[in-house]
Amino acid sequence: MLRYVTSGESHGKCLHAILEGIPAGLELSEEEVDRELARRQRGFGRGERMEKIEKDRVEITSGVRWGETIGSPITLTIINRDWTNWKNLMSIYASDKKIEEMMVRPRPGHADLAGALKYGREDVRDILERASARETAARVAVGAICKKLLAEFDIRILSMVDEIGGINARASRMKPEEIEKLSEASLVRCPDKSAEKRMVEAIKKAGKLGDTLGGVFKVVVTNPPVGLGSHTQWDLRLDGRLAQALMSIPAVKGVEIGGGFSVARKFGSKVHDEIFYDKTRGYYRKTNNSGGIEGGISNGEDIVTRVAMKPISSLKKPLRSVDMISKKGVLAEVVRADICPVPSACVIGEAMVAFEIVRAMREKFGGDSLKEMKSNFERYVGELKNL
């Protein structure tokens, strides 16, 4: 079984993640996780905190010895450098409470009001601190380990920005390796240079208006094996699990697998991926409208997901709201935030997809050690060639 939990608040002392189920024998260093954390912090449109304050670094405090996982739960800690400026406001002590510093003007589109009502809190900061996308730094740390494990099976995860503020990239004819290279070098993780330039200008314009922008990003799994997930129960279907994982990212409002909504407007003969066979490749497809998943099971083609992200709800020119104490109409709280976090959301999406692919791999191939898991994998792949 593979599972993880995270803890910590946006301006608390630190974030934690505990990851359980990684086999023993995987080489792992803090520097490898740090590289993924740094990728999450980059991207044009990020806010002042990510640009000037936080320099995310992980500390691994369990589950790794002498550079290798040992099969026990892996504990990851990321210190919030900004906490030094919030010690009293985020204090655990009742003596530090100040009524005048409570936040009572919930932001439309955020968890502020719904969370405060659900948990019976008078200060919406009790909600927004955990609902904040800052929590995803811990997820990216978990994803970094999952990506390292997948690399042992020659499986890679890559991402790109498809759209920001209605500006679309043109990358449909690019190979995955080309998309990855160009996206990593882009200010907005977009491989289309022309679209990148227009996206940057749109983000600048939104910033001047005190507004925010959303967009669409793509996450692709290359070289997955046939047989991940299952058709036998609703909660075992791989596409459903990927959709839930991606939908859990803050501000995400939609997920597509493969052709997604576009296939609903076509004839079946134009949608389904025809099946071919040769002795060298085995079964294969010339198209991939299904996004690498059929009946909840991976079919061996690249797994392709597209994710829609709304503009974030922290606006410098706030929308109308209601004061939770006086019940009078007011403007919502103004909270320091990004203008457009879509490029960094790509990296979070990679982490969530990596976790779900590893979870399916662990269910399929088991193994307490990496050596055992690889042996099971290789035997299975070998058997497929005879079918």
Image (tube, rainbow, N blue to C red):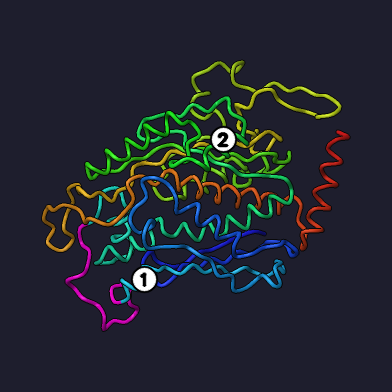
**Image quarter (top left, top right, bottom left or bottom right) of the C terminus:** top right
Query: Which contiguous range is marked in magenta?
Result: 88-105
Q: Main secondary structure of the magenta part?
A: loop
- Mark 1 lies on residue: 83
Is residue 96 located in the magenta-colored stretch of the structure?
yes
Q: Say whether marks 1 and 2 touch (CB < 8 Å).
A: no
Q: Say what secondary structure mark 2 lies in.
A: helix
Which disc, if any, is residue 184?
Answer: none
Q: Looking at the picture, how far across and down is residue 288, in whole percent? A: 63, 27
Q: Is residue 258 visible?
A: yes
Q: Residue furthest right?
A: 386
Q: Which residue is at 17% across, 54% downward?
A: 322
> Image quadrant of residue 181?
top right
Residue 372 or residue 350, whichever sits in front: 350
Q: Say what secondary structure mark 1 lies in.
A: helix
Residue 85 or residue 197, whichever sits in front: 197
**Image quarter (top left, top right, bottom left or bottom right) of the N terminus:** bottom right
Amino acid found under the numbered disc labelled 2: Ile
Q: Looking at the picture, how far across and down is residue 132, in whole percent? A: 37, 57
Is 282 placed left or right of 201 in the picture? right
- Mark 2 lies on residue: 179
Q: Is residue 132 visible?
A: no
Is residue 122 positioned above or below 257 on the image? below
> Image quadrant of residue 13?
bottom left
Is residue 257 positioned above or below 372 on the image? above
Crowding around mark 1 (Cα neighbors within 10 Å: few <14, some 14 to 19, many 20+) is: some
> Image quadrant of residue 232?
top right
Is residue 15 located in the magenta-colored stretch of the structure?
no
**Quick one: label 1 or label 2, which is nearer the N terminus?**
1
Residue 39 or residue 22, whichever sits in front: 39
Is 353 placed left or right of 152 in the picture? left
